[in-house]
Image (cartoon, grey):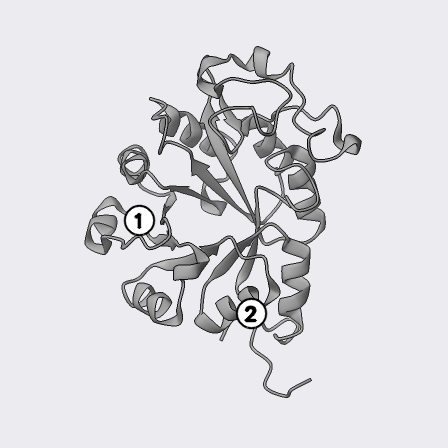
Amino acid sequence: MKRPAVIAHRGASAAAPENTLPAFQLAMRQGADGIELDVHLTADGIPVVIHDETIDRTGTGTGRVADMRLEQLRKYDFGVWKDPSFAGTRIPTLSDVLMLLDGWQGSLNIELKTDVVRYPGIEAAVLKLVADADRQSRTHISSFHHESLAVCRRLNTGIELAALLDHHQIPDLPALKRMGVTAIHPDVRDATGAHVRRWHREGFLVRSYTVDPKPLVLWQALCGSDAVITNRPLESALFLGHFFRKGQGRLRTDGK
């Protein structure tokens, strides 16, 4: 049994403001195997990294990302809501993040947030930035809106695609295969051993979200998930380290 990879959900978001450069920098310093982030499209067609369709929760302003130009969005603070020490943090573009990750060997999970607002052209814009940054082999595109994944496959035959699943959602595995999807990202409550084994038999990688409590982290390792997507990458990695042999990634059997 192999140790699951640890993917930092919106960066190291338990300790730093989610989906910001400080959160991604911290995730890298903490030794995360990968980083997950969310992308929307501004009114002037620029991919920006933020989870919600509006800036109301994490920014100091209000309004929809789709209705604002990047210049407008840059006026707001996206760090102070987490802690005053993060005051002055601005919304990052996807290009900003790719520059930050230049030379880093971890994986990047880009979630296209097209399940509420469709954002025409977002797939092409994101794929171009990934290709220009020469990160395609270390990047996978995920979305709850699976049609976005189909669009990505039509535009790019090589990049890895991952289908996000809502809680209790039953995936149409043949349809996902026809789209060229090769990974499933289920709600952790649905990532049981039986489900993970079935998805593996069908040829899919499995990365579960959002896995924070330590018992859930270990449970996902025992279920065989390939990765855990967590807000606490350092804690999750250290906890898993107690159960897996250093350097081998295999479950300990000596009880030490």
Residue 27 in the image: state x and y as whole percent.
66, 47
Look at the picture and state if 191 lies above or below 135: below
Q: Secondary structure at mark 1?
A: loop
Quadrant of residue 41 in the image?
top left
Of labels 2 and 1, earlier in sequence is 1
Residue drawn at 27 percent across, 63 percent down: 202
Residue 164 in the image: state x and y as whole percent.
38, 47
Look at the picture and state if 209 lies above or below 158: below
- Give the residue number, with chain letter if any, for mark 2: 218
- Give the residue number, with chain letter if any, for mark 1: 181
Residue drawn at 33 percent across, 22 percent down: 120
Quadrant of residue 244 in the image?
bottom right
Front-lying residue, 99 or 83:
83
Look at the picture and state if 19 lies above or below 7: above
Classify mark 2: residues with Cα within 10 Å, few (<14), some (14-19) or many (20+).
some
Q: Give the mark toward the camera: 2 or 1.
A: 2
Q: Secondary structure at mark 2?
A: helix
Answer left or right for 225 relative to 253.
left
